[in-house]
Image (cartoon, rainbow, N blue to C red):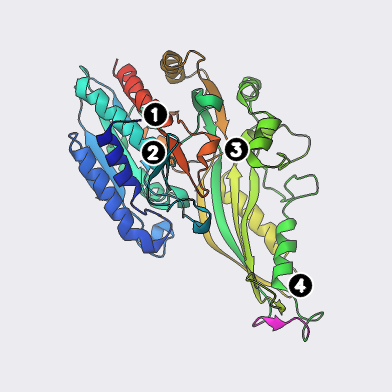
């Protein structure tokens, strides 16, 4: 358990329904960012809420949630540290599958169940609590800058658009992020690379209304069937990607990267126990690590068409939509990958259908960091003091889209260490984060800030 005052602060943060991708939750996002600004203000941080000057540049139809930037000046000659996190969370859907209300923190068996309890409110807030602990007793205090955004779960469009003009504000020596996972049994993990991500919506339209399947069956094109055909064309039967040009420019992993990744990878049996099915996604003949860390993907996130209620409604749907995302690896650019997919889709539109592509978010490309980095060596030493097993290196298949933009704008060396576990069920109903994980993140903050300050 953590101290009562820390738990109360944590729970107050979790109660904000800060779903950044939902315009109806804009007020909740502003209130959440304001709460964090006040919290940091008590530690001597000067905070400000930032919005893009030109909202249209972000591709959003409405004002995006604010970016909170806060800075606490340190001692002369001490390093400057930039910390990034996000206060937005995934939607709670499907709400019916939650055992307790999704925005009411509930403790069971040493875990806090709530949307955002781990991703990323629990992780970043634990780090900030550790930062508070460190500042209370530190003899050398670095300048610390904190950036907390409200759009990470929907692509970080606002912060990505603003980052190039924030170079002086963001300038730092090190970029710290706590939004990833540890290895099994909470063994520490240093993230040596992340895949990038882009996403968009495909819409097919056929007949001018839903039609009676008896009167029009056999002559009217079916949008639901057409969408199934279209998305299935993206892959070959062996699971490989069928899109011409999509893989152009990919930089394969070095031998030492692949070897290190294989050493820390979960087993087939562990993944099957976690997922409830065999890990057979991706291309046949490639290892789990290759498919999840070093290969790009095109995933169908959802298909919606026709009738899905109780009983039957015998219609031929007039429209279908598919939500599609792409995980990208170094060497690919989001624009080029998207153009390859769009060209493929346009060339494979089924007969009788008109296609449109909407809500395109280019996101960011993937990156890998050099294993010989002095910052990695320092982190390895700190994490070995926390855990005698020492850290492993992971090339994470997930994405934090804005890290590349922050890295470029700040000039800082990234150090990404998180404490998530598969049982946290992020992005799913009944998300949770244990007090043990919270304390690990808090301890990591104290130790790494002390080590960086010298």
Q: Which mark is residue 338?
A: none
- Regarding residue 412, the answer to whether it shows in the image is no
- Dot 2 corresponds to which residue? 122
- Dot 3 corresponds to which residue? 331
Look at the image and give the residue range highlighted in magenta. 208-214
Of the numbered discs 1 and 3, the one sitting upstream in the chain is 3
Q: Position of residue 139 (x, y in %)?
A: 20, 17
Furthest-front residue in this view: 109
C-beta proximity under 8 Å, tags 2 and 3: no
Of the numbered discs 1 and 4, the one sitting upstream in the chain is 4
C-alpha separation, residue under disc 4 versus residue under disc 2: 49 Å
Q: Which mark is residue 351?
A: 4
Could you classify mark 3 by the number of other residues whose Cα lies within 10 Å: few (under 14), some (14-19), or many (20 or more)?
some
Q: Does 327 appear above or below 133?
A: below
Of the numbered discs 2 and 3, the one sitting upstream in the chain is 2
Of the numbered discs 4 and 2, the one sitting upstream in the chain is 2
Q: Does 58 appear above or below 185?
A: below
C-beta proximity under 8 Å, tags 1 and 2: yes
**Label 1 element class:** helix
Whether residue 368 appears in magenta in the rendering, the answer is: no
Q: Is residue 248 left or right of residue 7?
A: right
Q: Closer to us: mark 4 or mark 2?
A: 2
- Dot 1 corresponds to which residue? 441
């Amino acid at each position: 358990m953590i101290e009562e005052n820390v738990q109360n602060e944590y729970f107050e943060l979790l109660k904000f329904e800060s779903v950044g991708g939902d315009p109806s939750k804009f007020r909740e996002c502003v209130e959440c960012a304001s709460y964090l600004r006040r919290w940091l203000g008590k530690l001597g941080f000067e905070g400000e809420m930032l919005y893009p000057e030109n909202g249209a540049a972000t591709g959003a139809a409405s004002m995006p949630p604010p970016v909170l930037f806060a800075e606490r000046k340190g001692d002369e000659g001490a390093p400057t540290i930039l910390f990034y996190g996000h206060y937005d969370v995934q939607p709670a859907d499907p709400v019916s599958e939650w055992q307790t209300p999704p925005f009411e923190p509930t403790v069971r068996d040493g875990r806090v169940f709530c949307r955002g309890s781990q991703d990323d409110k629990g992780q970043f807030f634990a780090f900030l609590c550790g930062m508070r602990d460190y500042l209370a007793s530190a003899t050398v205090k670095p300048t610390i800058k904190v950036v907390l955004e409200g759009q990470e779960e929907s692509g970080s469009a606002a912060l990505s658009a603003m980052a190039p003009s924030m170079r002086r504000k963001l300038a730092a020596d090190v970029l710290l992020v706590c939004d990833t996972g540890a290895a099994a049994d909470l063994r520490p993990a240093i993230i040596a690379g992340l895949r990038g991500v882009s996403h968009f919506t495909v819409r097919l339209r056929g007949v001018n209304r839903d039609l009676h399947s008896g009167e029009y069956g056999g002559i009217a094109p079916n949008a639901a069937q057409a969408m199934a055909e279209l998305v299935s064309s993206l892959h070959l039967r062996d699971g490989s990607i069928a899109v011409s040009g999509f893989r152009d420019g990919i930089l394969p992993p070095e031998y030492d990267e692949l070897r290190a990744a294989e050493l820390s990878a979960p087993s087939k049996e562990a993944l099957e126990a976690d997922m409830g099915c065999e890990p057979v996604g991706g291309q046949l003949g490639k290892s789990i690590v290759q498919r999840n860390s070093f290969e790009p993907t095109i995933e169908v996130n959802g298909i919606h068409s026709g009738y899905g209620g109780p009983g039957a409604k015998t219609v031929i749907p007039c429209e279908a939509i598919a939500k599609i995302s792409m995980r990208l690896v170094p060497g690919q650019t989001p624009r080029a990958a998207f153009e390859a997919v769009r060209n493929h889709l346009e060339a494979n539109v089924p007969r009788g259908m008109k296609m449109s592509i909407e809500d395109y978010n280019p996101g960011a490309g993937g990156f890998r960091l050099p294993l010989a980095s002095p910052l990695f060596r320092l982190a390895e030493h700190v994490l070995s003091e926390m855990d005698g097993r020492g850290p492993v290196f992971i090339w994470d298949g997930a994405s934090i889209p804005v890290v590349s933009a922050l890295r470029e704008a700040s000039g800082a060396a990234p150090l990404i260490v998180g404490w998530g576990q598969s049982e946290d069920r992020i992005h799913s109903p009944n998300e949770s984060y244990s007090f043990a994980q919270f304390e690990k993140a808090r301890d990591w903050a104290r130790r790494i800030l002390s080590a960086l300050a010298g």
